């Protein structure tokens, strides 16, 4: 009888040790993945356009989100101007960027945004994977003047 109870006790302590080690491994793995997703950068780049919106959003986690209109001047030979929007997030601790983005959104100036693309969007950081790192106001003198439409709104005036 003592051999059976000893082997059962050894099996129980061995299983407990295995489960404890497995839990420690899972916690360390989870922390490593979270550090990777938080700090690792997938790509960096820049976009230029006009800031359409900058707002503080979120039900639980308040984050700063924005949108710029990327005007594709000269990319297509046509009278029709193409436009595309680019959504981004701004880190909470970058009040200088937030203030500059709010200012240029009111004036309608063209800006150049430098951003980092992360691997995943974490809810406490922002809604998108794109995080603005700098904002630069652009000179408008090199941009073509927008064409005016006639009274019907169908044709451009030359």
Image (tube, rainbow, N blue to C red):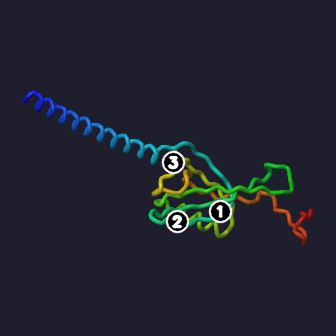
The residue carrying mark 2 is 57
Q: Using the image as rendered, state which of residue 112 and residue 81 is in the foreground.
A: 81
Residue, x 59% and y 67% (percent of image)?
102
Q: Residue furthest front?
A: 1
The quarter in which the C terminus is drawn is bottom right
The residue carrying mark 3 is 120
Which mark is on residue 51? Answer: 1
Determine the CA span between mark 3 and mark 1: 24 Å
**Residue 28, relative to residue 155: is it above or below?**
above
Find residue 142 and report its image quarter.
Answer: bottom right
Residue, x 25% and y 39% (percent of image)?
20
Residues at badges 1 and 2 in contact (C-beta under 8 Å)? Answer: no
- Tell me which numbered mark, 1 or 2, is placed earlier along the sequence: 1
The percent position of residue 153, horizontal first and vertical second, equals 87, 68
Residue, x 18% and y 35% (percent of image)?
13
Find residue 66 and report its image quarter.
Answer: bottom right
- Other residues around mark 2 within 10 Å, as few (<14) / some (14–19) / many (≥20): some
Determine the CA span between mark 2 and mark 3: 18 Å
The quarter in which the N terminus is drawn is top left
The percent position of residue 157, horizontal first and vertical second, equals 91, 65
Disc 3, SS: loop
- Other residues around mark 1 within 10 Å, as few (<14) / some (14–19) / many (≥20): many
């Amino acid at each position: 009888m003592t051999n059976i109870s000893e082997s059962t006790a050894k099996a129980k302590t061995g299983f407990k040790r295995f489960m404890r080690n497995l839990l420690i491994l899972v916690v360390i793995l989870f922390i490593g993945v979270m550090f990777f997703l938080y700090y690792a950068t997938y790509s960096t780049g820049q976009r230029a356009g006009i800031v359409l919106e900058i707002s503080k959003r979120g039900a639980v986690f308040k984050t700063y989100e924005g949108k710029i209109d990327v005007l594709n001047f000269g990319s297509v030979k046509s009278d029709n101007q193409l436009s595309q929007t680019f959504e981004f997030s701004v880190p909470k601790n970058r009040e200088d960027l937030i203030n500059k983005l709010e200012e240029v959104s009111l004036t309608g100036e063209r800006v150049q945004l430098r951003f980092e693309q992360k691997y995943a969007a974490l809810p406490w950081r922002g809604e998108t994977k794109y995080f603005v790192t700098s904002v630069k106001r652009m000179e408008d003198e090199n941009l073509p003047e927008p064409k005016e439409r006639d009274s019907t709104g169908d044709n451009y005036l030359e």
